[in-house]
C-alpha cells in the first residue's frame, strides 16, 4: 500500500514540475533556432560558392561600404556582418549590393561606412562577389 502511495506522489510531483517548466516550449524554441542556423549556414555555403566563382572568373571592381551592422552570428569565432555596398562595375555603373559576410576580427576595422574595398565581381550577377580584405583598394 505504501509503495503505490509513493508512486502516486511522484506522479503528482512530476505533473507539477511539468506545469512550472514546460519542456515543449523549450524544444520548439530549440528546433526553430536550429532551423534558422541551418538556413543561415546554407546561405553562407551558397555565398561561398558564388564568391569562389567570382574570385576565379570575376572582374576587378571597387566597392564602397554604405552601411555595416553585426548580425549577432559568429562563424569560427569571426562575426558575420551585413554589408550594404555600392559596387562600381568596370563599365562605370554603380550597383547596390547587400550581403552577409564573415569578417575576420583583424579586418573589422575596415567595415566602416565610406571605406573602399577591392572586390572581384561576376559581371552577370553583381551580388556574386569576392572581397579582398587584405589588399588596399
Image (cartoon, rainbow, N blue to C red):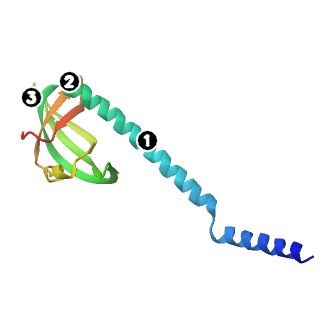
Answer yes or no: do the residues labelled 2 and 1 have beta carbons within 8 Å?
no
Label 3 and label 1: CA atoms lie apart by: 35 Å
Front-lying residue, 111 or 76:
76
- Residue shown at the point (35%, 33%) measured from the top left: 46
Q: Is residue 17 visible?
A: yes
Q: Is residue 42 above or below residue 8?
A: above
In the picture, measured across the screen, residue 66 lies left or right of residue 31, that is: left
- Residue shown at the point (71%, 73%) measured from the top left: 16
- The residue under label 3 is 92
- Crowding near pointer 2: few (<14 within 10 Å), some, many (20+)? few
- Residue shown at the point (39%, 41%) measured from the top left: 41
Q: In which quarter of the image is residue 131?
A: top left
**Which quarter of the rendering shows the N terminus?**
bottom right
Q: How many tags in the picture?
A: 3
x, y (%) of residue 2? 89, 78
Front-lying residue, 112 or 74:
74
Query: Is tag 3's residue or tag 1's residue first in the polypeptide sequence?
Result: 1
Q: Quadrant of residue 130?
A: top left
Amino acid at each position: 500500500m505504501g509503495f503505490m502511495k509513493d508512486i502516486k506522489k511522484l506522479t503528482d510531483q512530476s505533473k507539477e514540475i511539468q506545469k512550472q517548466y514546460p519542456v515543449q516550449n523549450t524544444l520548439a524554441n530549440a528546433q526553430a533556432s536550429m532551423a534558422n542556423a541551418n538556413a543561415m549556414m546554407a546561405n553562407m555555403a551558397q555565398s561561398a560558392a558564388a564568391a569562389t566563382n567570382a574570385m576565379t572568373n570575376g572582374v576587378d571592381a571597387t566597392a564602397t561600404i554604405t552601411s555595416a551592422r553585426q548580425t549577432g552570428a559568429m562563424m569560427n569565432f569571426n562575426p558575420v556582418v551585413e554589408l550594404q555596398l555600392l559596387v562600381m562595375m568596370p563599365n562605370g555603373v554603380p550597383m547596390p549590393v547587400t550581403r552577409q559576410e564573415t569578417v575576420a576580427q583583424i579586418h573589422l576595422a575596415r567595415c566602416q561606412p565610406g571605406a573602399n574595398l577591392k572586390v572581384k565581381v561576376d559581371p552577370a550577377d553583381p551580388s556574386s562577389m569576392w572581397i579582398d580584405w587584405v589588399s588596399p583598394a
